[in-house]
Image (tube, helix red, strand yellow):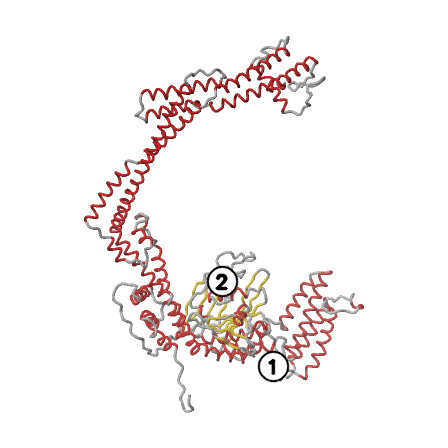
């Protein structure tokens, strides 16, 4: 800029918003034009119109696209908000443990609510904080301890005025209640918020408020659009079940989506008359091909082949039967058995044992030996004095001898020879132990299936099988084989069965070949039929499929537009930050720096990192440190106060509430805060809740000459009755008269008692008399030039001190004061005086002495 250039005024927030809107799409300009026109939220009906405009502009809707012209800046300013005052808080019910029937009437300038800890003061301020929905608001509960009996839902009545109209609301534990949201509240909980956190402005001027409203409308369009995309994408491909897998149409339907070639599908959906006739013909041919199933023929042939093969093996076994070997093995068994039986007859001769050597007896003896083998007994069992294994009775000598014979019967060499011979015979006979019932059924099945066998051939097979059965039975029973023509009959039957097996094999081969050919033809016709049928079904569904594809293409295009919203909102945020810098942040920075000077806040840097079209501020100390890591507790408190006051000053006139704002502050800074609050009360209604008597008296001192501009309330408790509100002009302090009354009450009570009780009441009265002496000096003799709870010296009161009469009063009062110190427990006493107890008469004399001195001083000329 040259030396003679005239600086240009900063752009207004409105002009910056218009400039941004004219660089966006028409639907965005439509939002901005509506926001500039009306301060109200955009109605749903209008947001729906804007959404339709968006769809039309992006080619995602049907119809003509209306043209939205560029916006112009007419320079119209934001709305002006009328002044807001709190008038009265009353009719509190079920608020903590507060008693009922208490009122707080607020002065238009300054109201001070003083109360000690646990007096109930916090309950009143919590109602205002919750209704205002301030950052540090706390839940308001009924009496959870149960002292007051408050059990219902908290409620109160709040009277207020906006402009010239006064009204009231019945608060029922609501939060964010209009117009109380305009109230500013500062308390200890808000300190860290105003010091360390990145804060949005509680109040945004109308010019800047348009940016979040525009953002909200864009987000609304975006939300509707996102929902439409999700809804459109919910419908999956439901068409696959209608088509046969493997057809060309199925492949196309399987990949149905935005990339689908609709013209190709539409062409495939058109069938000629010839193709429609072909569908009917193919259906008949396919049914015919399927009706005579070769699988059944092949299975029947396979079953016949298995049966013939099984019979052939059985018959062939008897062709190869070695009768000589069979006879030899039978003879060995017979010889061994004869030897074994002869030995046993000799061994058991003369013994009268029923059924001896009969088959049942033999099984019994063998079973006993097997049982003995499972037991752990000596190999020489039985011997003399052995126990019977069955009955556990001692065995007599004859019994021992008999058991030895039984064991010899089971374990002799003759027995072993017989077992070996029998085993060899059983092994030879085993291959001929066949299921002739099954073979008979197989032969019957073969004869029923093979129709070309002659009667002689059928008879040969039946006779041979019957002879095989008879021969097998004879061998199992170890009888002679009676089948003279065995080799001839079995050989001829085996040859016949082999021929049948070869015929079955050839038949199966032929059936397999025919099956393969038929399956090939069937597959070709089924393929042709499936393709034509798929095209026929496609013709029925083509409109739905076309709608599905168009929807998929719409989703693809929509997702491209969906990704652009972030850029629109980001550019809006940048423009909002620029507007904030021009209109809000620059103003806030100036005000914050002024507050920092007034409250001696340590140097720090303000930053304004706007996000989502919001105005945000944060504070750092030194390079980039959070203030809480560097500043003391008191410095953090005044920093928070400066931030709070700067922010509050940006808002239209509304009440400012301070809840114990000077915790952690020294007396110098308390005075600075007092001056700042008094200055603030000149432009806004201020309400202060505090338990600090110094702070309260300093505030009151500023309004001594203008008492009508300040209201004072004392909140206290009486035993379990909490939150008693008393209107006054100053924090309660002792005076000559009220102390004298209290001493007189103690004197009256002491006069009615005796002993230790009386002495205790007198001692307590002397403590009160000592305080009375101090109050007389402060308020009467020195005329209140200095007071215990006030830091300043009241020089204007100095002429009211009666110097001529001062010494006489001091000579009377000081001895009484020193005497009180000797008689109260809070002062140490010499040993000599510990037994000297104050008397009631002495108390009366000392009180009269002080009273007379005061009256004499008051009557003396100034």
Circle on res. 77: none
In which image quadrant can residue 45 be found?
A: bottom left
Residue placed farthest to the left in the image? 273
**Between 565 and 735, which is closer to the camera in this rendering?**
565
Give the image location of residue 239, x and y in percent: 31, 51
Q: Name the residue beneath numbered marker 1.
A: 794
Nearest the viewer among 717 and 848 is 717
Hey, which quadrant is residue 414 in on the image? top right
Residue 117 % position (x, y) = 59, 66
Coordinates of residue 266 in the picture (x, y in percent)? 25, 55
- Tell me the element at label 1: loop
Residue placed under numbered mark 2 in the picture: 92
**727 or 183: nearer the eye?**
183
Whether residue 246 is visible here, answered yes or no, is: yes
225 relative position to 777: left or right: left
For the C terminus, the quadrant is: bottom right
Q: What is the spatial separation of the Cα atoms under label 1 and label 2, in whole angstroms? A: 40 Å
């Amino acid at each position: 800029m040259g030396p003679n250039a005239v600086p240009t005024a900063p752009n207004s927030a409105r002009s910056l918003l218009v400039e941004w809107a004219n660089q966006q799409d028409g639907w965005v300009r439509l939002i901005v034009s509506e926001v500039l026109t009306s301060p109200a939220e955009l109605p749903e009906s209008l947001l729906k119109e804007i959404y339709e405009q968006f769809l039309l502009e992006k080619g995602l809707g049907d119809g003509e696209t209306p043209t939205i012209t560029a916006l112009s800046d007419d320079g119209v300013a934001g709305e002006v908000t009328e002044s807001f005052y709190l008038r009265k808080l009353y009719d509190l019910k079920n608020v903590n443990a507060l008693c009922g029937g208490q009122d707080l009437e607020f002065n238009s300038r300054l109201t001070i609510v003083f109360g000690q800890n646990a007096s109930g003061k916090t309950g009143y301020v919590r109602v205002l904080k919750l209704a205002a929905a301030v950052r540090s608001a706390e839940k308001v509960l009924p009496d959870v301890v149960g002292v007051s009996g408050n059990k219902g839902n908290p409620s109160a009545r709040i009277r207020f005025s906006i402009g010239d109209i006064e009204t009231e609301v019945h608060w029922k534990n609501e939060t964010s209640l209009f117009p109380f949201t305009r109230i500013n509240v500062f308390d200890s909980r808000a300190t860290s918020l105003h010091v360390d956190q990145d804060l949005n402005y509680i109040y945004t001027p109308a010019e800047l408020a348009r940016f979040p409203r525009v953002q909200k409308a864009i987000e609304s369009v975006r939300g509707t659009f996102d929902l439409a995309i999700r809804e459109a994408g919910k419908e999956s491909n439901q068409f696959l079940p209608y088509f046969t897998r493997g057809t060309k149409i199925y492949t196309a339907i399987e990949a149905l989506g935005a990339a689908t070639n609709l013209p190709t599908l539409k062409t495939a959906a058109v069938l000629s008359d010839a193709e429609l006739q072909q569908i009917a013909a193919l259906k008949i041919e396919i049914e015919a091909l399927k009706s005579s199933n070769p699988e059944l023929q092949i299975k029947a042939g396979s079953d016949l082949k298995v049966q013939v093969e099984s019979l052939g093996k059985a018959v062939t076994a008897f062709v190869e039967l070695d009768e000589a070997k069979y006879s030899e093995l039978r003879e060995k068994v017979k010889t061994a058995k004869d030897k074994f039986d002869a030995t046993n007859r000799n061994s058991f001769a003369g013994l009268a044992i029923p059924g001896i050597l009969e088959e049942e007896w033999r099984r019994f003896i063998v079973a006993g030996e097997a049982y003995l083998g499972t037991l752990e007994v000596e190999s020489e069992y039985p011997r003399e004095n052995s126990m019977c294994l069955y009955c556990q009775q001692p065995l007599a000598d004859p019994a021992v001898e008999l058991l030895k014979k039984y064991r010899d019967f089971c374990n002799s060499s003759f027995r072993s020879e017989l077992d070996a011979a029998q085993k060899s015979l059983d092994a030879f006979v085993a291959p001929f132990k066949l299921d002739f019932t099954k073979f008979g059924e197989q032969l019957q099945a073969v004869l029923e299936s093979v129709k070309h066998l002659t009667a002689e051939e059928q008879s040969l097979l039946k006779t041979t099988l019957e002879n095989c059965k008879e021969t097998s039975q004879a061998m199992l029973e170890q009888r002679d084989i009676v089948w003279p023509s065995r080799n001839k009959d079995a050989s001829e039957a085996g040859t016949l069965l082999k021929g049948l097996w070869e015929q079955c094999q050839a038949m199966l081969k032929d059936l397999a070949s025919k099956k393969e050919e038929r399956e090939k033809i069937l597959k070709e016709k089924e393929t042709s039929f499936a393709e034509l049928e798929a095209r026929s079904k496609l013709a029925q569904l083509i409109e739905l499929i076309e709608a599905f594809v168009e929807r998929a293409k719409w989703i693809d295009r929509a997702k491209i537009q969906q990704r652009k919203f972030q850029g629109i909102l980001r550019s809006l945020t940048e423009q909002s930050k620029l507007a904030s810098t021009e209109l809000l942040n620059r103003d806030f920075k100036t005000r914050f720096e002024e507050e920092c000077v007034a409250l001696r806040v340590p140097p720090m840097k303000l930053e304004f990192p706007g996000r989502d079209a919001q105005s945000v501020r944060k504070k750092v100390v030194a390079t980039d440190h959070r203030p809480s890591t560097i500043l003391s507790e008191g410095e953090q408190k005044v920093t928070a106060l400066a931030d709070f006051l700067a922010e509050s000053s940006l808002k239209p006139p509304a009440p400012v509430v301070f809840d114990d704002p000077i915790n952690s502050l020294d007396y110098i800074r308390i005075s600075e805060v007092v001056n700042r609050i008094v200055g603030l009360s000149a432009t806004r209604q201020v309400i202060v809740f505090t338990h600090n008597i110094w702070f309260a008296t300093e505030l009151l001192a500023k309004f001594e000459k203008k008492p009508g501009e300040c209201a004072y309330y004392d909140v206290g408790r009486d035993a379990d009755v909490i939150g008693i509100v008393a209107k006054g002009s100053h924090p309660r302090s002792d005076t000559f008269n009220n102390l004298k009354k209290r001493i007189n009450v103690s004197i009256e009570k002491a006069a009615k008692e005796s002993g230790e009780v009386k002495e205790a009441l007198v001692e307590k009265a002397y403590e009160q008399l000592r305080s009375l002496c101090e109050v007389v000096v402060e308020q009467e003799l020195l005329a209140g030039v200095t007071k215990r709870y006030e830091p300043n010296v009241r020089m204007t009161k100095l002429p009211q001190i009666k110097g001529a009469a001062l010494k006489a009063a001091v000579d009377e009062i000081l001895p009484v004061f020193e005497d009180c110190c000797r008689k109260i427990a809070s002062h140490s006493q010499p040993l000599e005086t510990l037994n000297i107890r104050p008397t009631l008469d002495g108390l009366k004399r000392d009180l009269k002495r002080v009273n007379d001195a005061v009256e004499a001083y008051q009557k003396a000329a100034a």
